[in-house]
Image: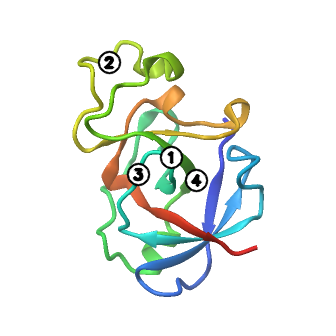
Amino acid sequence: MMSDRVTLVAAALTHRLVAVTVDGVSMEPAFRDRDQVLVIRGAKPAVGRVVVAESPLGMHGWPQEPLAAKAAPPLLAQRHWMIKRVSALPGDPIPRRCVPALADASGERVPGGMAVLLGDNRAASFDSREFGYFPLERILGVVRLPSR
C-alpha cells in the first residue's frame, strides 16, 4: 500500500502548531517526499484544504482511541500520520463517482463526524477511495504553511 505519511518533528513548535515532514508521493505535485509543512492543530477543515490525519492500519481502522485535542507532542509522535486533501465534509453530497469505497454508502450526504480525504496523486494514494470515510476526530489539523 502506497501512501504519504508524515513524520512529526521531534519537538512540536507549540501544542497548536506542529511541523511535519511528508513521507511519500501521494500528494504530488502539491507536496513532495521530504517537503516540510506546518499544521495548525484543531483548525477546522474545509473542502479543498490539505490536512494531516491519523492513518488507519490498512482496511482495519485504528487500533487506539483518537488522541485528545491537546495531546502532547510525544503522544503525537507515537501515531502514524498522512497528508491528504479534503474532498467532502458532513452534509456534502457523497462523491460516489470518484470514491469507489462509498459507492454503496447509505444516504445522499456525508454523515456527521466524517470526511472524505483524497491524495492528489491517485495512483500512489491510500485514501477514501479504498477506505471510505475518515472520522473528523482523526484529523490532526490543517496544513497552513509550506516551510520549504
Q: Residue at x 46, y 54 (%)?
A: 54
Front one among 70 and 87 = 87
139 w.r.t. 109: above or below: below
Observer-side mark, 2 or 1, equals 1
Quadrant in the rendering for residue 7 = bottom right
How far across and how far down the image is residue 139, in percent?
A: 41, 56
How far across and how far down the image is residue 72, in percent?
A: 39, 80
> Marks 2 and 4, Cα distance to the nearest angstrom?
24 Å
Which amino acid lies under the numbered mark 1 shown in the image of this protein?
Gly
Residues at marks 2 and 4 touching, judged by CB atoms closer than 8 Å: no
Which amino acid lies under the numbered mark 2 shown in the image of this protein?
Ala
Bin the neighbour count of mark 4 within 10 Å (Cα to Cα): few under 14, some 14-19, many 20 and up. many
Q: Which residue is mark 1?
A: 48
> Marks 2 and 3, Cα distance to the nearest angstrom?
22 Å
Q: Which mark is residue 46?
A: 3
Q: Which residue is mark 4?
A: 83
